[in-house]
């Protein structure tokens, strides 16, 4: 069986401090996605500047990099069919004011500068972000016992 699609998801410092780690992880677990890697760490300025390099010319960039260093984060890799797009749908719109109820941002936060979670926006950016945050050997290879109950094929 070929490996299914992967995405990079990260609980931001506000999500950690507000005690939302378990609740956020549960949404991905309960959907049927498979956890491939996870850590709990303080992100450095250098790593965050690389992670958000595409936004470096925007006025809020310094505040974004500062916010992401306010406390520990929980970077993760999740696997499953269409997990990049579905992950974004589970997360909701960038600005929580526009995020639908039922989404993580729609239900659990209010401001764009405190939007509690990151998710890759395409398969190529997922690949880049996974490689930036994780070493190959940190991506765990195992078989989920639920696989045949979640996928017909
Ligand atoms: P997303 O996190 O939904 O992929 P993005 O990649 O456009 O959104 O931006 C990355 C983060 O930057 C976002 O989660 C919060 C912050 N951000 C985006 N637009 C902003 C804005 N107009 N003002 C302040 N922060 C913003
Ligand atoms: Mg983005």
Image (cartoon, grey):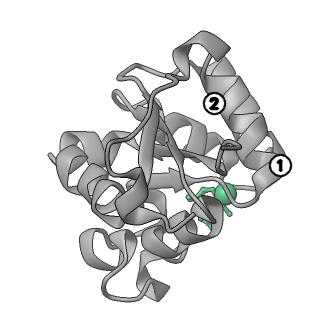
Rounded to the nearest whole Å, what is the CA distance between mark 1 and mark 2?
18 Å
Q: Is mark 2 within 8 Å of ligand 1?
A: no
Task: Name the spot of residue 14 as percent of width and height, x first.
Answer: 31, 47
Q: Name the residue tied to disc 2.
A: 48
The answer to which of marks 1 and 2 sits earlier in the sequence is: 2
Task: Name the spot of residue 36 as percent of width and height, x first.
Answer: 48, 33
Lateral position of residue 11 relative to residue 18, left or right: right
Q: Secondary structure at mark 2?
A: helix
Q: Nearer the viewer, mark 1 or mark 2?
A: 1
Lateral position of residue 141 relative to residue 24, left or right: right
Q: Quarter of the image for the C terminus: give it.
A: bottom right
Asked if the residue at tag 2 contacts the one at tag 1, i.e. Cβ–Cβ closer than 8 Å, the answer is no
Q: Name the residue tied to disc 1.
A: 124
152 or 21: nearer the viewer: 152
Task: Name the spot of residue 149 as percent of width and height, x first.
Answer: 35, 62
Q: Secondary structure at mark 1?
A: helix
Q: Quarter of the image for the N terminus: give it.
A: top right
The residue at the point 45 percent across, 68 percent down is 91
Looking at the image, is 10 positioned above or below residue 106? Answer: above
């Amino acid at each position: 069986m070929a490996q299914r699609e992967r995405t990079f998801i990260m609980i931001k410092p506000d999500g950690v401090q507000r005690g939302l780690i378990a609740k956020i992880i549960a949404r991905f677990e309960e959907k049927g996605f498979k956890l491939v890697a996870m850590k709990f760490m303080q992100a450095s300025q250098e790593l965050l500047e690389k992670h958000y390099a595409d936004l470096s010319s925007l006025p809020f960039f310094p505040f974004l990099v500062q916010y992401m260093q306010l406390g520990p984060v929980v970077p993760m890799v999740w696997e499953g069919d269409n997990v990049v797009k579905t992950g974004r749908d589970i997360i909701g719109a960038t600005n929580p004011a526009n995020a639908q109820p039922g989404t993580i941002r729609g239900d659990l936060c209010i401001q764009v500068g405190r939007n509690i979670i990151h998710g890759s926006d395409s398969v190529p950016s997922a690949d880049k972000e996974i490689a930036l945050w994780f070493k190959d050997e940190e991506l765990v290879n195992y078989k989920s016992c639920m696989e045949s109950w979640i996928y017909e094929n």
